[in-house]
Image (tube, grey):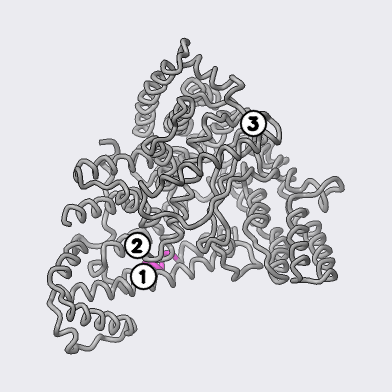
Amino acid sequence: MLLQDAVVASQKGQMQFSSKAISFLILQKASIMRQFALSCFFALLFACSESTPVATSDTTASLSPEEQLAAQIAAETARLNAWLDEQFAEQLDFSPQWKTRLGDKSDYDKLDDASEEASTRLLEWRRNSVAQMRASFDYEMLTEEAKTSWDVWVYALERAERSKPFERHDFIFGRGGPHASLPNFLINYHRVDDASDMRAYLARVRASADVMNQYLVRSRRAVEDGIRQPLFAYDFAIAEIGRVTAGYPFTETGESPLWSDIRSKIAALQESGAITSAEAEAFIAEATTALQQSMKPAYDEVLLWLHSDRANASTEANGAWALPDGEAYYNHRLSLMTTLDLSADEIHEIGLSEVARIRAEMEAIRERVGFTGTLAEFFVFMREDEQFYFPNTDEGRQGYLDLANEFLDSVASKLPEYFGILPKAALEVKRVEAFREQDGAAQHYASGTPDGSRPGVFYAHLSDMRAMPRYQLENISYHEGNPGHHMQISIQQELTDIPRFRTQYGYTAYSEGWGLYAEALGKDMGFYTDPYSDFGRLAGEIWRAVRLVVDTGIHAKQWSEEQAVQYFLDNSPQPEAAVRSEIQRYITGPGQATAYKIGMLKIQELRASASAELGERFDIRGFHDTVLGGGALPLPVLEARVGRWVEAVKAQ
């Protein structure tokens, strides 16, 4: 089967004691009295420090060898989980902004250190952490779930080690760079509940000057190494900076997005009685100074550099192959994004095969709706016919958001038939803020907080409604909302029986693979009753299959931008504006686009394999809970997890 050669490598040792076997022995042998004795023994173990030996007692003597082993494994697992939680708390100290996204207000007045030196310090910390784990814990004395935590912690180090040599290859000031993401962070993540929160907000505005300078230093070092983004990426950044700094207090006309946010947050404090009118005026004055004297000069310096270096950029957008050590860099990116060892040629061929399969399904729908032209002509019809688009007006944009909510409301009622674990967090559908909105850019999801204080958000770029066909909205709603990203990420954040880092770590192949799997799952759940929406589902899937072809084409086979655009248009009904935006995204983010389809195929493969092995005992709810119930995982680790679930069902 596709991707079946992906294997899981144990991070330590060859022997693994089966947690299933332990559970079976306990269930068979433990009487009520022995369960009581086990509880006492666990309490004794957990109360001891790492260096304190556990004394032999009548309690331990009353246990069978199997029960004693189970107790030891439970104790070692509890000790590792507690240690990993401590380590993750240390890791968060490297990123005040990550803390904020998690709803943690410690270091609330600080921004992340964006320097290469900070990256080196974090890598060294990871090395020391893994070395300490290996020296302090016994891998063979852990439950299978704890071994997964161990493996993921080690995998994170290995991933960081492999990425370090290429840290200057990532383009910084391009589409959605720090010049846009920092205002977005302050507006959407920095919650202001009292005066101290506003002081922290303004401290972060002042700190933005140092952060932008750190990014600028890194960008200059990259171009010195011969690494320069294509011309269009400079233009993206220049335009985004223009939108961030348009309006008061940067210019006299209108209000800048940050100023509007600051004013509204100060006004809310004053209305709630948290601050006086005099304090509000003082905050307004302080904000004006911070934006004009700290942020604006830093943005001006970045803008000056972008205009200056733009003259050195190639007008022809080339793939990773044109960068120094480009082939090795692209192979690294493919491994990083897919979490599998697949070559560019293998991924290219998978893409070609999937495009052919999906085209055949599209032909069937073309015939079903009575369209007499060719599939290529049907693509043009779907791109151009007015019935498939909302008006390019505020009413049309609201209609798009309303329809998305209708789809999500419908699917919510059927989720319990397919999932045992359901998300607690709320979900909202919103238009992207004007300062970071782009014509034809892909919709995306922003996670809420684990405590539910901030909902998850499905964002849509609605500046050009001709790039947002309504026939694709159903599958996109399932992808970004439920049962897609919102469900997967919310459940991950809400897990309580695994170390906290596993509720926050992410892998593109897993999360985006799940999002695309969720689109197909909507068909299994009885949706896509409109054949045009069903065609939209296939359009979404072929979009991701085309990515396998064009991403590898651009970065490994030296395809031109126009060659990639034409292949996309020949095999998809996507509007041309959206296609061109997508291709430019692939050019500046090598390999990322391959993760979606590869992840989907792996999850579908695991489901088919589990169903074949279990037959009538296969439970779709159990499968989905297994996939989502362990947090985001590298695909080989996910495959091992599903395999253990299959074996456990067999043993029941």
For residue 14, which numbered disc appears in the image? Answer: none
Q: Residues within 10 Å of mark 3 (few under 14, many from 20)?
A: many
- Of residue 88 and residue 587, the one placed in the foreground of this image is 88
Q: Is residue 332 left or right of residue 607?
A: right
Q: Mark 2 = which residue?
A: 149
Mark 1 element type: helix
Q: Is residue 16 visible?
A: no
Q: Is residue 351 above or below residue 423?
A: above
Quadrant of residue 10 within the rendered picture: bottom left
Q: Is residue 398 inside the magenta stretch?
A: no
Q: Mark 3 = which residue?
A: 465
Q: CA distance from mark 2 to mark 1?
A: 8 Å
- Of residue 72 and residue 24, the one placed in the foreground of this image is 24
Residue range highlighted in magenta: 126-132
Q: Is residue 202 left or right of residue 384?
A: right
Where is residue 537 drawn, in percent x and y?
A: 45, 31
Q: Mark 1 = which residue?
A: 81
- Of residue 530 and residue 586, the one placed in the foreground of this image is 530
Q: Is residue 281 above or below residue 41?
A: above
Residue at horizontal 28 percent and vertical 54 percent from the top: 641
